[in-house]
């Protein structure tokens, strides 16, 4: 996890003659699109600008490479990968006028798809190429999260701060098994330990305490590869959508979970929804996950930032 203060975030403008920087994650989507990268770069070059592939061996190096590229004056930044790759790149372009293109090539591509890009990476690159040729970009909102220590993170899709975040944290601590089975085992362990947590929630300044199992704050509607946890979220309305699932027991949670893919879980009597510009969230022992990436510990303040990034479409 990387965290920066607001003052550390670069204020940068695109260089019209600069290269298009590309952050690519060859392991995204379990590597199924790895062989497509040369083709995607060739197609990108048809936009008539130099193409610069960023080098990084870790997620932290990827984020640092994106920040450096923006500061050095690239004309645009692309992220080829899933939501995690996009999340790293967003830390560099958020709050700047450097246009950004998410090319969905991961297991979860929620931000790209929810903001209007084709799910197919080749088709998404064609959209980016056309936007670069035409000098066109489209503003969308981002969420800015601030921790108790002043650390700042941006995210594009959804912040998870309930059961799903707890499962992710458990899975990340496990050394065995490898692959998706580790996540499945983490679910079973945390289901056995399931209990509502006490949250303090401020929605545009209105405070309440609540016992909950699921808590999500969405700029977009989906997380986890198409789960419509915040189904009515709109990344152009300047607002955050908050979904709180209350005192679910194990059986009820397992019945409700499949409904999240359709977004119909919000009709359950234990689910409450809110819409706000700013949300303050506190609870003991919770590490949040933003765009599927490990992020800040609670308490956090999340603010909707209108037109915080310009997308190449």
Image (tube, helix red, strand yellow):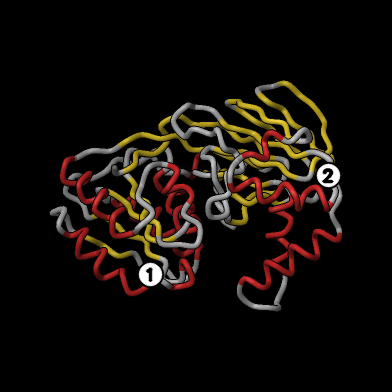
When asked about the image quadrant of residue 121, the answer is bottom left
> Image point 67% across, 40% down: which residue?
265
Q: Position of residue 101 (x, y in %)?
A: 33, 49
**Most foreground residue, 114 or 18:** 114
Dot 2 crowding, Cα within 10 Å, few <14, some 14–19, many 20+: some
When asked about the image quadrant of residue 266, the answer is top right
> Image point 46% across, 64% down: which residue?
61
For the N terminus, which image quadrant? bottom right
> Image point 80% across, 60% down: which residue?
190
Dot 1 crowding, Cα within 10 Å, few <14, some 14–19, many 20+: some
Q: Position of residue 63 (x, y in %)?
A: 46, 58
Name the disc covering residue 33, or none: 1
- Name the residue carrying label 2: 197
The mark nearer the N terminus, 1 or 2, is 1
Up/down of 48 relative to 187, above or below = above
For the C terminus, which image quadrant? top left
> Image point 72% across, 41% down: which residue?
299
Up/down of 239 relative to 193, above or below = above
Q: CA distance from mark 1 to mark 2?
A: 39 Å
Q: Position of residue 252 (x, y in %)?
A: 80, 47
Up/down of 69 relative to 298, above or below = below
Up/down of 158 relative to 51, above or below = above
As helix, strand or loop, the secondary structure at mark 2 comes to strand
Number of marks present in the image shown: 2
**Most foreground residue, 99 or 226:** 226
């Amino acid at each position: 996890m990387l965290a920066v203060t607001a003052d550390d975030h670069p204020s940068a403008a695109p260089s019209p003659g600069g290269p298009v920087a590309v952050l690519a994650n060859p392991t995204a989507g379990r590597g199924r699109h790895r062989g497509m990268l040369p083709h995607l770069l060739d197609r990108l070059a048809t936009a008539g600008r130099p193409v610069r592939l960023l080098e990084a061996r870790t997620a932290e190096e990827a984020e640092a490479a994106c920040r450096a590229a923006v500061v050095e004056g690239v004309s645009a930044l692309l992220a080829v990968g899933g939501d995690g790759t996009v999340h790293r790149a967003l830390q560099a372009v958020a709050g700047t006028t450097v246009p950004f293109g998410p090319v969905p090539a991961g297991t979860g591509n929620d931000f790209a798809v929810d903001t209007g890009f084709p799910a197919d990476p080749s088709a998404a690159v064609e959209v980016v190429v056309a936007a670069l040729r035409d000098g066109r970009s489209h503003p969308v909102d981002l969420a800015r999260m601030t921790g108790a220590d002043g650390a700042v993170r941006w995210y594009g899709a959804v912040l998870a701060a309930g059961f799903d975040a707890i499962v992710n944290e458990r899975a990340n601590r496990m050394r065995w098994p490898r692959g998706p089975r580790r996540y499945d085992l983490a679910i079973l362990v945390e289901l056995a330990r399931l209990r509502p947590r006490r949250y303090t929630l401020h929605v545009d300044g209105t405070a309440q305490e609540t016992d909950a199992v699921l808590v999500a704050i969405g700029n977009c509607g989906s997380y986890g590869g198409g789960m419509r946890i915040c189904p009515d979220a709109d990344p152009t309305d300047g607002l955050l959508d908050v979904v709180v699932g209350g005192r679910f027991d194990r059986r009820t949670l397992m019945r409700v979970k499949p409904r999240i893919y359709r977004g119909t879980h919000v009709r359950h009597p234990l689910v409450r929804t809110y819409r706000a510009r700013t949300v303050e969230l506190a609870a003991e022992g919770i590490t949040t996950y933003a765009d599927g990436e490990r992020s800040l510990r609670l308490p956090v303040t999340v603010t909707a930032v209108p037109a915080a990034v310009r997308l190449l479409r």
